[in-house]
C-alpha cells in the first residue's frame, strides 16, 4: 500500500474504449466559468534545492526567458498549480475543467504555460521538456512570493504529471512546507516505455498530430532565431525518438533521446516523494506502457497513492453529471482538499 483499489471510476455507457475516452474531450468538451488573469514573469537562474545525490542538469543554467501564468482567483487562502501536457496550454479543456473544480472547492488556481505554449515563442533555443522542473520551480516561487498562501497543491497532466512527480522526488524533504499535496493524471512515469508505446501503429493518429504541432513550434523558433535551428528533412521524423534525438536532447544538454528519457523519467524519483501524492493512470491509456504503472514504488512509499482505473484513456475519465465535472477532477480535488 497505498494502492487504491478498486478504483471508484466507472465509465459511462459506451465509453469504456481508451481511444474514445482520449479523443472525446478534445473535440466535444467545452468548459465555461473560468476567467484567467494573465501574468508574465521573467525567469533565469533558479534557486533550486535538490535531494542529496541528485545533481542539477545543465538545462538549469542561466537562460533569460519568460513564462506566462494564468490565474483563476476566488480570494482563497490555498492555491493549486496546474501543469499541462505535451503541446497543451492553460486553455485546454482538461486544465479548465480542473481549474473550475478547484475554484468551486475553495482553491485559487495558477495554470502556468510551458515555454512557447502560451501563444508566443519563448526567447531561447531551449523549450520545455518532460524534466524541466526548474520552470515548475519558477511558478512555485512566484506563488510563494505572494505571501498569502499557506497551502499549495500541485496538479499535473500527462507530461506535466511526470514533471510534477520528478519535481517532488528531486526535492524530497526539501519541498517547501506549504506544498501539502499533489496529483498526477495520466503520467508517463517511464518515458522510454511511453515513447515506444506511442510509436506503435495504433497510435499513429496521435503521433502525427504531436509531430505537426512540434514542427510548428520549430518553425516559429526559426523565425525569431534565424540560423540557429532548421527543419530540413523534418518529414523523416516519425516518432518521439526521432524528434528527441534531433531536437530535445541536443537543445537541453542530453546525449541522446535515451539519455533524456533515462534522466527525466519520474518513476526513479518516486521513492523520494515525501508529500501525499495521488497518481491516476488508466489501464487502457493508449499512451502508457506497462512500465508507466509504478506499482512497487507506490507499495513501498506511504506518500504515493496509485489508482489504476480499468478505463479512462489518456486524460479522459469522462463523466456526465449536472456539475459537468469529470471523475478525475472530482477525485483529485477530494484528495487534495483532505490533506
Image (cartoon, rainbow, N blue to C red):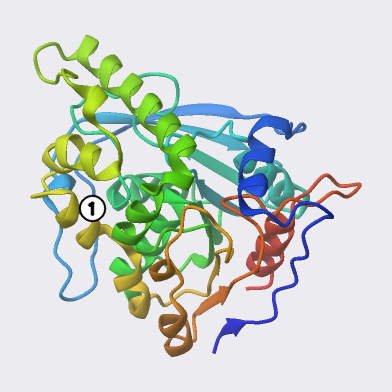
Q: Which residue is mark 1?
A: 47
Rendered residue at 35%/19% (across/down): 216
Rendered residue at 55%/64% (across/down): 281
Q: Residue furthest front?
A: 201
Judge left or right: residue 157 versus residue 337: left
What is the quadrant of the C terminus in the image? bottom right
| Residue 73 makes an appearance in the image | no
Q: Nearer the viewer, residue 143 or 26?
A: 26
Q: Nearer the viewer, residue 264 or 337?
A: 264
Residue 183 drawn above or below residue 111: below
Rendered residue at 29%/43% (across/down): 240
Q: Helix, strand or loop at disc 1?
A: loop
Where's residue 277, x and y in %?
A: 52, 71
| Residue 90 makes an appearance in the image | yes
Judge left or right: residue 275 versus residue 46: right
Judge left or right: residue 278 versus residue 98: left
Q: Nearer the viewer, residue 21 or 14?
A: 14
Where's residue 298, x and y in %?
A: 47, 81
Residue 193 drawn above or below residue 231: below
Q: How many marks?
A: 1
Q: Residue furthest right?
A: 322
Residue 263 drawn above or below residue 82: below
Rendered residue at 71%/33% (across/down): 34
What is the quadrant of the N terminus in the image? bottom right
Where's residue 148, x and y in %?
A: 55, 51
Q: Nearer the viewer, residue 13 or 82?
A: 13
Label 1 CA crowd tier, 10 Å (few <14, some 14–19, many 20+): few
Judge left or right: residue 300 versus residue 55: right
Amino acid at each position: 500500500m497505498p494502492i487504491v483499489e478498486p478504483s471508484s471510476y466507472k465509465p459511462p455507457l459506451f465509453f469504456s474504449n481508451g481511444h474514445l475516452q482520449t479523443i472525446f474531450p478534445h473535440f466535444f468538451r467545452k468548459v465555461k466559468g473560468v476567467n484567467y488573469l494573465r501574468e508574465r514573469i521573467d525567469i533565469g537562474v533558479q534557486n533550486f534545492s535538490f535531494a542529496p545525490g541528485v545533481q542539477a542538469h545543465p538545462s538549469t543554467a542561466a537562460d533569460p526567458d519568460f513564462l506566462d501564468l494564468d490565474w483563476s482567483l476566488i480570494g482563497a487562502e490555498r492555491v493549486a498549480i496546474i501543469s499541462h501536457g505535451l503541446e497543451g496550454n492553460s486553455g485546454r479543456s482538461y486544465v479548465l475543467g480542473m481549474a473550475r473544480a478547484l475554484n468551486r472547492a475553495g482553491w485559487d488556481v495558477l495554470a502556468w504555460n510551458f515555454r512557447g505554449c502560451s501563444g508566443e515563442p519563448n526567447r531561447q533555443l531551449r523549450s520545455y521538456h518532460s524534466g524541466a522542473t526548474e520552470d515548475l520551480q519558477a511558478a512555485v516561487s512566484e506563488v510563494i512570493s505572494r505571501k498569502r498562501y499557506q497551502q499549495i497543491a500541485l496538479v499535473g497532466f500527462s507530461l506535466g504529471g511526470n514533471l510534477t512527480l520528478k519535481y517532488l522526488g528531486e526535492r524530497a524533504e526539501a519541498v517547501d512546507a506549504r506544498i501539502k499535496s499533489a496529483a498526477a493524471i495520466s503520467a508517463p512515469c517511464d518515458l522510454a516505455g511511453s515513447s515506444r508505446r506511442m510509436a506503435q501503429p495504433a497510435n499513429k493518429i496521435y503521433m502525427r498530430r504531436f509531430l505537426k504541432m512540434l514542427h510548428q513550434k520549430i518553425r516559429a523558433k526559426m523565425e525569431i532565431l534565424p540560423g540557429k535551428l532548421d527543419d530540413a528533412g523534418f518529414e523523416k521524423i516519425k516518432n518521439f525518438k526521432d524528434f528527441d534525438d534531433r531536437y530535445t536532447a541536443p537543445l537541453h544538454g542530453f546525449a541522446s533521446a535515451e539519455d533524456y528519457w533515462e534522466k527525466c523519467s519520474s518513476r526513479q524519483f518516486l521513492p523520494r516523494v515525501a508529500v501525499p501524492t495521488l497518481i491516476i493512470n488508466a489501464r487502457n491509456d493508449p499512451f502508457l506502457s506497462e512500465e508507466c504503472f509504478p506499482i512497487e514504488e507506490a507499495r513501498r512509499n506511504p506518500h504515493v497513492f496509485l489508482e489504476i482505473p480499468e478505463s479512462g484513456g489518456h486524460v479522459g475519465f469522462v463523466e456526465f453529471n449536472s456539475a459537468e465535472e469529470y471523475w478525475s477532477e472530482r477525485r483529485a480535488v477530494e484528495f487534495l482538499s483532505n490533506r
